[in-house]
Image (spheres, rainbow, N blue to C red):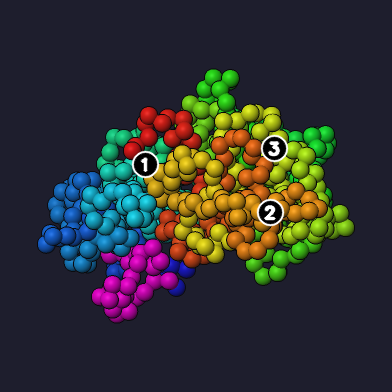
Amino acid sequence: MRGELMLRGAALARSMKLGRVRISYVPVRHVTAGCGAGDAPKGGKGLVVGLYEEEAGKGPRLTPAGETVNDRVQGKLSEMICETKLTGRLGRGKVFNNVDTDFRSICVVGLGLEGIAFNELEMLDEGMENVRVAAGIGARSLQSIGCNEVHVDNMDYPEQAAEGSALAIWRFEENLAKKHRTTIPKLVLFGSPDMESWTRGLFKAESQNLARRLADAPANCMTPTMVAQAAVDSLCPCGISVEVRTMEWIEQQHLNSFLMIAKGSCEPPVFLEVAYCGTAPEDKPILLVGQGITFNSGGINLRPSKGMDEFRGDLTGAACILAAMRAAAALSLPINITAVIPLCENMPSGMSCKPGDVVTLLNAKSMAVRNISRTGVVVIADPMLYGQMTYKPRLVVDVGSMCKGVKKAVGGGATGIWSNSHYIWKQFQRAGSLTGDRLWRFPLWRYYKDRVAEHKSFDLLNDGDGYASSCLAAAVLHELVPCSDWAHLDTYGTGLLSTYGLVPYLTAGRMTGRPTRTIVQFLYQMACPADTPK
């Protein structure tokens, strides 16, 4: 596979001269000292080091950890960097083999300019994101040549180096034969004693990888019951309580909007109540609500068969929330968090919801379900009301892949957010700028409320009238939050299959698990506002 993708000989040299080779898309070329040309040693330890870009007449410069290795090999590393004309440009580099006795392979990856930080126009801490990119590309390159242990240069940001490398080497290969599976190397911090930051980064990356696994599994391997079992297996060992509610309980609680969609499938629905207590039990929790449609065929409004398999990922909201709660427990955040997660399938059958059906919600409002393929707001409507009535939260955050409008607007560049609180939006914006997984705020104007709530025969309409489908979905959910601070995250463009504008440390054509780390960072900021960087 590697041989099919690599540019060879004159073609590679030509592309490098033109500045078109990007290591994020083309595997790193291997330069070997002391063995046959082109040989890449299998197994053993590898090392990723960063290289700052040349500027102001000065050549490219290795990081302090890289300089340590260079001194140990008597300058061989810097000589090979000079010979191969590496410039330190972000994401471009090479693997050098048999240069050092401790490491069989050393991957030198460009970090971009040294000292860059927050970019206000991009709303991104570019220094942190560059480290994720470089660490991820380097770790994946060493993984591709069979290294079973990868040491990663801290590059001044050990937490971000851990995130990028752990996200890059992860693969969903549970359905592959064992002989065809990719080896996941052990990651080790190099050149820094800051193990606390490194471990924190690993926790965050592993939580996103959990969300990727849940979302990427085939629908028959991740039914509502199987998601519930995965939640118990993942969260209970961390001290998080998980209550698994069955059909009988759901009917007793009159969660009718949830049942209206769930009844179309033979798979029984499941309702999860998940609680993490990190501070005094009497403190009000943050309520998280996750859309958990394990397969969304569109119901009677059946989707086209081409691309329908992507909608196994319509549980991305539930997956992100379960993963974020696991990270919150691993990080011991001093905050109370409660999650309610309805899990079901949306399938066509004689029991399916029909276009135009009306359901009465827990708040006594009626909702007409006109478009069965837009079931996200219907599935979480009653569960969100139930969570508010039961737990009296200080804040409500719901997450789900609701409508394609947000994808048409911003693609995979940002998760859409709607909120009735400017403070909550600013906290999410700050969290996104630090994690590299950004959010963008969309309007929650009365214009959209009038499109979903001004009807003569019923109180609410699940799809509204007119364009701006994502804004209309947010307007429906806003009607279900009478007095709490609230935020709605639409992951349709970021949480499903990665297609365009691929993040270099994620895998093309797979579920992304976004925006798990941003939710974790947001929870941290809410739990420890004094420690949040300004």
As displayed, is residue 349 above or below residue 127?
below
Left or right: residue 114 compared with residue 276: left
Quarter holding the C terminus is: top left
66 within the magenta span: no
Residue at the spot of label 1 = 159
What is the number of the mark on residue 385?
A: 3
Q: Amino acid at mark 1?
A: Glu
Task: Say which of marks 3 and 2 sits in front.
Answer: 2
Task: Say which of marks 3 and 1 sits in front.
Answer: 3
- Label 2 vs label 1: CA separation? 44 Å
| Residue drawn at the location 28% of the way across and 38% of the way down | 192
**Secondary element at tag 1:** helix
| Residue drawn at the location 67% of the way across and 70% of the way down | 306
Q: Amino acid at mark 2?
A: Val
**Secondary element at tag 3:** helix
Residue contact at pointers 2 and 1, CB within 8 angstroms:
no
- Label 3 vs label 2: CA separation? 18 Å
Camera-nearest residue between 442 and 488: 442
Q: Would residue 91 be visible to someone looking at this image?
A: yes
Q: Which residues are magenta?
A: 5-32
What is the number of the mark on residue 452?
A: 2
Q: Would residue 246 be visible to someone looking at this image?
A: no
As displayed, is residue 531 above or below residue 292?
above
The picture places residue 413, in percent across and down from the top left corner, at 46, 59
